[in-house]
């Protein structure tokens, strides 16, 4: 595979202020796990490193909103994320966290070494300070009006309405998110990594030395380097994070982008006492799996940090993916527009591999891609069930039916048999080449081609027809089908480990190493177990439930963004007193014929029983409203509606989407009670 003795595979550390969603999985964790499982099957030495990124401002903001500590937040989400990954089959050798003692010690030592060797520059700058809170404000702690689009709630680092990157000082009328006060600019000192000093080295290392990197990664790096690099702060004024370990830096922590990648090193140190051979030995190949928003950190900033420190190896490849959208819209944690992994595992029990399969088949490898629930259903039903599942099920069932569950002997081969058998190593070779080049989508397609090959061979040879006239031929056909099935256990294991294990159970076989595929793996006379369903059909109702959930989220987001109508002009108290509003009770109701909206109500007002025509029929049935307490304006001039005299008006609250709700007393009151 390569000249390296061992492999160090890292995945971007998910931020511990929320759960993991399908965008994270498609971008980082599924491709990384596929690659690691492939390396293990090949007999390569590999460690697979993951962990939670637990420092930074978004965590402190969430903690403040919920009235808990940042540690409470990261404990909750670290445990949820770790459990979800385990259940989903992401096979980390360690899943660590950046609040660990090892991480704090290692990050401090890393900073201190660079500091003592003069690798940082000190700079004083003006930064917003909240006098009332007694602290400097990180960009996310400042909101104000976006100078580009006028959004009143832009953050100090970005306007989420128009997507423009901002500095806090760009905002119009900035406000502290902590106290609501107007912050003041105040002088503060920080330490910076002078990236500009590493620019020429980075150009040579990346642009000349790594032309094999994926085009989206190489292109983004080239763009950054062509625009020129600037010094970047490695410290922040914050009380949550790794304290800056030098005198005069009280109240400051290491910037989260600086300490987070060091988390890969600290996790490896927690995993093994031999951690240095993975980080400092030139015979180790290091690969970072990340999303496109992390390219600059893993290709430019972290390598510059490692180069400055001097004793660490550099990444050999950074196969970053682009973004996955959901039903045509960007996945957004803040808008709850996502398919959350822990919810998927609850809703689709035992179907981890279906999601792994769909996310790989639809992976955003060089451009953004879209996940839809209909595509998820189609790929499961038309590919996993109808091709893969159908083939292995028929091969096993027929073996039990004709040969008592014993693998039959292979007899003389004809040209078609030889053609099929020759295609098996060719498919395996194509899967391998694609995996080596991080083309996971193509690799999966080739893996499925092996199931397609078996399916077609079985359909073409029709052993169920031959059994009466040529049992020897049927033995050969089913022997070949069972060998293909055995190969599928190994070939599909990196992509669908749960199904591969299940299939091995059906075939009563041990895990198959990569190099043994393509041979006659199952000997004649080997007993196989009864077949079960590898995959089952996903019905329309299950998909509709997911679409309904997303629709409800969309509606909630629309309502959240709608501002209340401005207040009308003031009226005098005397004018208000002229309104006679009473508590009433609906005692009869019927829809008004030939209308969509109108309902005829009989209301006990305490003064009398009167008829009121109300436009509520789209939102309530007559049966629902009988007995309901309402607020009624009783001194409204009568009005004829569709031939009915309406004597009053029922007060309703109109939601942003136009839906209506009764304005009712909180508890039962006598009809006729005045509402003041």
Image (spheres, rainbow, N blue to C red):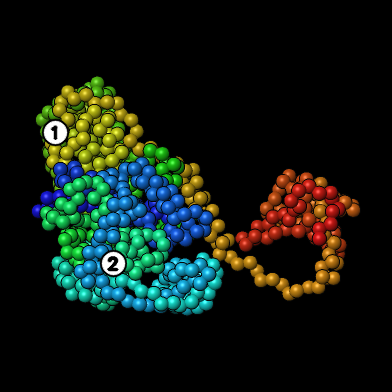
Can you give x and y, in whole percent of width and height, for residue 552 in the image?
54, 53
Query: Which residue is at 22% across, 42% downward?
Result: 491
Q: Nearer the viewer, residue 216 or 471?
A: 216
Can you give x and y, in whole percent of width and height, for residue 36 in the image?
23, 48
How many numbered discs sit on the rendered protein?
Answer: 2
Which residue matches tag 1?
A: 520
Mark 2 crowd level (few <14, some 14–19, many ≥20, 10 Å Cα): some
Please indicate whether residue 506 sits to the left or right of residue 175 in the image.
left
Q: Secondary structure at mark 1?
A: loop
Query: Which residue is at 33% across, 30% downward?
Result: 532
**Picture quarter with the C terminus:** bottom right
Query: Which residue is at 66% across, 71% downward?
Result: 566
Which residue matches tag 2?
A: 296
Of badges 1 and 2, nearer the viewer stands 2
Please indicate whether residue 32 sits to the left or right of residue 54 in the image.
left
- Seen as rendered, the residue at the extreme right is 607
The quadrant holding residue 525 is top left
Q: Earlier in the sequence, mark 1 or mark 2?
A: 2
Proximity of marks 1 and 2: CB atoms separated by less than 8 Å = no
Can you give x and y, in whole percent of width and height, for residue 404 in the image?
24, 21
Can you give x and y, in whole percent of width and height, for residue 39 in the image?
19, 47
Q: Secondary structure at mark 2?
A: helix
């Amino acid at each position: 595979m390569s000249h390296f003795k061992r492999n160090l595979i890292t995945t971007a550390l998910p931020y511990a202020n929320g759960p993991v969603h399908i965008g994270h999985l498609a971008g980082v964790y599924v491709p990384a796990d596929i690659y690691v499982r492939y390396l293990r099957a090949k007999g390569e030495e590999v460690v697979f490193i993951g962990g939670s990124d637990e420092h930074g401002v978004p965590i402190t903001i969430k903690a403040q909103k919920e009235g808990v500590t940042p540690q409470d937040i990261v404990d909750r989400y670290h445990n949820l994320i770790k459990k979800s990954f385990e259940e989903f089959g992401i096979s980390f050798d360690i899943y660590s966290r950046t609040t660990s003692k090892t991480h704090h010690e290692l990050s401090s030592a890393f900073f201190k070494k660079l500091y003592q060797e003069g690798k940082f520059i000190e700079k004083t700058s003006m930064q917003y300070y909240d006098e009332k809170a007694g602290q400097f404000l990180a960009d996310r702690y400042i909101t104000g009006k976006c100078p580009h689009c006028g959004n009143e709630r832009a953050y100090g680092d970005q306007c989420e309405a128009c997507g423009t990157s901002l500095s806090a000082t760009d905002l119009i009328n900035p406000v502290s998110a902590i106290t609501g006060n107007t912050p003041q600019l105040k002088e503060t000192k920080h330490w910076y990594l002078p990236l500009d000093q590493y620019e020429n080295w980075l150009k040579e290392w990346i642009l000349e030395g790594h032309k094999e990197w994926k085009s989206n990664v190489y292109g983004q790096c080239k763009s950054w380097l062509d625009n020129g690099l600037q010094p970047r702060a490695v410290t922040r004024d914050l009380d949550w994070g790794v304290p800056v370990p030098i005198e005069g830096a009280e109240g400051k922590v290491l910037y989260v982008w600086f300490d987070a990648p060091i988390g890969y090193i600290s996790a490896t140190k927690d995993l093994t006492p031999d951690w240095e051979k993975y980080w400092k030995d030139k015979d180790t190949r290091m690969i970072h799996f990340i999303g496109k928003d992390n390219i600059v950190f893993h290709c430019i900033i972290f390598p510059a940090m490692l180069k400055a420190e001097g004793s660490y190896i550099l990444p050999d490849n950074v196969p970053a993916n682009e973004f996955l959208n959901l039903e045509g819209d960007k996945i957004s944690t803040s808008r709850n527009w996502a398919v959350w992994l822990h919810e998927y595992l609850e809703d689709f029990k035992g179907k981890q591999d279906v999601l792994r399969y769909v996310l790989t088949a639809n992976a955003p490898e060089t451009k953004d891609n879209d996940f839809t629930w209909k595509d998820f259903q189609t790929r499961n039903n038309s590919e996993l069930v109808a091709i893969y599942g159908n083939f292995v099920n028929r091969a096993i069932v027929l073996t039990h039916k004709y040969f008592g569950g014993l693998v039959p002997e292979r007899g003389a081969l004809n040209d078609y048999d030889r053609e099929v058998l020759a295609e098996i190593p060719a498919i395996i070779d194509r899967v391998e080449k694609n995996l080596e080049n991080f083309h996971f989508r193509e690799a999966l397609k080739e893996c499925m081609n092996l199931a397609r090959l078996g399916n077609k061979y079985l359909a073409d040879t029709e052993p169920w027809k031959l059994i009466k006239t040529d049992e020897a031929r049927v033995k050969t056909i089913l022997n070949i089908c069972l060998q293909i099935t055995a190969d599928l256990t190994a070939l599909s294991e990196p992509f669908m480990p749960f199904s591969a294990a299940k299939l091995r159970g059906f075939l009563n076989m041990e895990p198959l190493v990569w190099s043994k595929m393509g041979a006659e793996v199952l000997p004649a006379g080997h007993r196989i177990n009864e077949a079960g369903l590898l995959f089952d059909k996903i019905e329309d109702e299950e998909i509709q439930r997911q679409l309904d959930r997303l629709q409800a989220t969309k509606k909630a987001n629309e309502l959240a963004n709608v501002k209340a109508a401005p207040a009308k002009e003031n009226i005098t108290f005397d004018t208000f007193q002229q309104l006679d509003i009473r508590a009433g009770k609906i005692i009869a109701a019927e829809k008004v014929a030939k209308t969509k909206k109108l309902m005829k109500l009989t209301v006990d007002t305490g003064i009398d029983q009167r008829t009121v025509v109300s436009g509520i029929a789209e939102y309530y049935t007559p049966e629902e409203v009988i007995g309901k307490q309402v607020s009624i304006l009783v001194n409204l001039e009568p009005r004829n509606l569709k031939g009915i005299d309406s004597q009053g008006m029922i007060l309703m609250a109109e939601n942003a989407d136009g839906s209506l709700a009764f304005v009712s007393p909180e508890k039962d009151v006598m009809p006729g009670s005045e509402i003041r």
